[in-house]
Image (cartoon, rainbow, N blue to C red):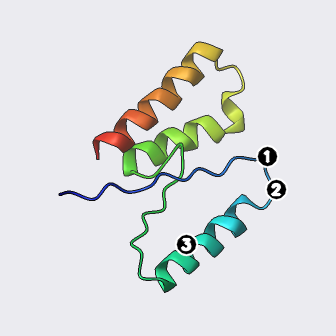
Amino acid sequence: MKRVGKFISFEGIDGSGKTTQIRLLEKSLKDLQIPVLMIREPGGTAVSEKIRDILLNADHNEMCSETELLLFAAARAQLTRE
């Protein structure tokens, strides 16, 4: 029987300590010899990281909401496919 992993998501505003908590959990799980795959969204793949760069680039402040939504969806699609 194939084992199914757990999906854990950390949410919060910039500077709230998400990365710190993620790294602590990752280390604890690895210390227990539990396999861990840490990803970020948008990102996590070469294509998704490029999409992330576009989304976070201040030069793109004229981007309409629909474009932003579709870029997030594209990054997620790429991540789940890979």
Mark 2, Cα crowd under 10 Å, few <14 / some 14-19 / many 20+, is few
Give the mark nearest the N terminus, 3 or 2: 2
Three-letter amino acid code at the position of disc 1: Ile
Three-letter amino acid code at the position of disc 2: Ser
Query: x and y percent of residue 66 in the render?
Result: 58, 14
Q: Which residue is mark 1?
A: 13
Query: x and y percent of residue 82 in the render?
Result: 29, 47
Q: Which residue is mark 3?
A: 26
| Residues under numbered marks 3 and 2 in contact, where contact means CB atoms less than 8 Å apart | no
Q: Which residue is mark 2?
A: 16
Does dot 2 land on a helix, a strand or a loop?
loop
Query: x and y percent of residue 5 in the render?
Result: 38, 57
Three-letter amino acid code at the position of disc 3: Glu
| Residues under numbered marks 1 and 2 in contact, where contact means CB atoms less than 8 Å apart | yes
Q: Residue at x 70, y 19 (%)?
A: 62
Does dot 3 land on a helix, a strand or a loop?
helix
**What's the distance in space between the residues labelled 1 and 2, CA to CA?**
6 Å
**What's the distance in space between the residues labelled 1 and 3, CA to CA?**
20 Å
Quarter-of-image position of residue 24: bottom right
Query: Foreground residue, 57 or 25?
Result: 25
Does dot 1 land on a helix, a strand or a loop?
loop
Considering every residue shown, the one lying at the far front of the view is 1
Tag in front: 1 or 3: 3
Q: Residue at x 39, y 72 (%)?
A: 35
Tag in front: 3 or 2: 3
